[in-house]
Image (cartoon, helix red, strand yellow):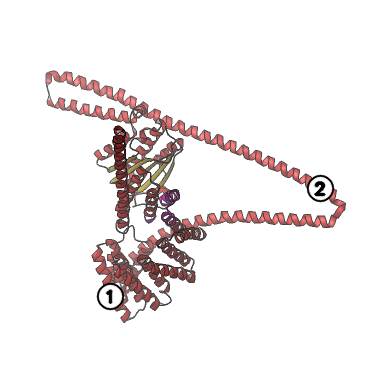
Amino acid sequence: MVATKKFSIILFSLLCIVHCSAQKDIEKIKSDIDSFSKFLDKDLDSAHYFIHRAYIKSIVLKKDSLLARTCYNLSYYFYLKDNVDSSKVFLKKGLEFSKKSNFKKIMSLSYNQAGTIAADENQFEKALKYYLLAFDIAENNNLHENKSRVLINLGNLYVRQKDTLKALEYYSKNIENALKFNLNNELISGYSNTAILYASTDKRKAAKYYNKALLIARKNKNLYAEYNLHINLSDLYIRYKNEKALKEVYQQLLQAKVIQQKLRDSNLLFLLNFNFGGYYKQKAQFTTAIEYYKKALNTINKNTPSNQVLNLYHTLSDAYVKNNDYKNALQVKEKQNKLSEAIFTIKKNKAFDEIQTKYEVDKKNLKIQLLTKDKIIQSRTKQIILIVSGIIIVFLLIFLLLYKQRVKTQKIIAENENKIHSQEVARLENEKELKRILGVVEGQDQERSRLAKDIHDGIGGTLAGIKLELSQVNTNLKSSKIDQIITNMQTAFNDLRLISHDLSVNSLKEKEFDFLLNKLKEEYKDRGEFDTDILIFPENAMNSISHNIRYQLFRVVQELFANTSKHAKASKVVVSCTIFDEQINIIFEDNGNGFDFSKKTGIGLINIQERLSIIDGTIVIESNPGNGTTIIIDIPYYGN
């Protein structure tokens, strides 16, 4: 009896320790999510560090609600980085986990984000559907902040449709909801958006709503909102084009400058200098205006919208003209034209894709309409025949109908046979392609093994023989220079041995996946090329996968490291490997110079895709010049 009590006490203590440990991990994840939110407006790289760490920890705990939060926030991060494909991947995962855990808030936020992505892609009906789903969830679960965010986005959606009345209706509903539940940030957004709508038609109303928003921002010490409102008010007052209004413009810009200095945020300098330039240009002080425009040019970074950069080039060129500096005006105009052409090319390609899609849809719709009209005509023809012919041709009509049915049946049979034949041909082609890829990859691996053997047995043996001969000769000579040559030859022999082991397939079979990754990491670090962080969860899971998958995956990661070394000029690489929900997920990120994936498909990427096709893997590559590269690889995993 006493032993049973002791065992119960020990068991209870262990359970308490486990519970406390798990609770601490949950608090750390929540702390990382809070840190992500704090850095979101200041430093996107730091924000990504915290949310990525929270995501890995959430996978360890296998807690659906935390996975829902971290996946949604990762989706939002990638959206801000203009990495839409990765944003969609994590948004889908976040939505699935929010449904599993019945996490209504994240569910509502996810549908809201899906609506925003659809709106950016000019898919109005799809965006409206997602926004209304987000709104219903928020309203039915008293998620007042979510409700206001959706109302703002609905207003923005109708602004895109140039339906000002509908947009004002949704902005007003947001203001009403925000006032009722003291949602200060949403109230600022509601007043600001309403002011923007009135800016071109009723400047007094616009100023009234901006100032309402400004009062709330000051009261709540929201310096970023206060800065933006001063900038917007300076834009509004400069439209009056009179001396009194210009004084107000200057005051608004001075207040914005004070806030920027408090925040010490260099990202705010672009608009501040741009608007100061506009102020001095309006006052016909063109030399001073040009100085501020140049300051604005120097603060352009990857987050600066291209339309604002175009606008800056245009106004700077105009200021040079008014200052009789036609040479510089022409140079700036040429830069504007180059940027405009680049943007036009991107938009043209996007528009072409949209037109192509619309054409295909219209083509299908036209086909359906023609088929429908065909059926109507046939039906009417039959009715006329029945009415005119009457009873006399009943038997003939029955005969014709039976004949038609027979022809139709034969046609369907023939079509099905053709379809089955086409499917069989496609299956054989796929098998043939897979065999070809397997042959190519096996050939490459055999060639690697042959080279490894030749290096080890051929060159390595020769070096060993030469070293032995030199050692014998130096027995009598005792030359320090020959000793140094022997030492150098031993180093060369060791290097050749390492190269032959790296090339050898059999050598890789003997080593665990995490060991091979860390070896790659040290190799590139020793070269002084870049630092690498490797995250594997569960810790030894990658060593339990089959040899074929492990081997192909290592060759893929090895190729990614080689591509980064050759092209990226990166200083940092992060590789995370996780096995979760019967899927192996590898995320490879670097902070290098990126590339235009639509224009580059080198042999390295082809080799990667061929290796992944062998193990049913998929790859998503997101990269833009100057913004680094993110590669997401997914492979099915059903246990060892």
Residue type pointed to by label 1: Gln
Q: Earlier in the sequence, mark 2 or mark 1?
A: 1
Q: Is residue 82 magenta?
A: yes
Residue 5 in magenta stretch: no
Q: Secondary structure at mark 1?
A: helix
Residue with the mark numbered 1: 251
**Helix, strand or loop for the magenta stretch, by majority:** helix
The residue stretch that appears in magenta: 79-108
Residue 224 percent coordinates (x, y): 30, 65
Q: Which mark is residue 398?
A: 2
Q: Which residue is drawn at the image coordinates 45% and 71% (left, top)?
A: 168
Decide which of 603, 518 is in the foreground and name it: 518
Residue plotted at (34% across, 25% down): 453
Q: Which circle, 2 or 1, is nearer the viewer?
A: 2
Mark pair 2, 1: CA separation = 91 Å
Which numbered disc covers residue 451?
none
Determine crowd level at label 2: few under 14, some 14-19, many 20+ residues with C-alpha closer than 10 A: few
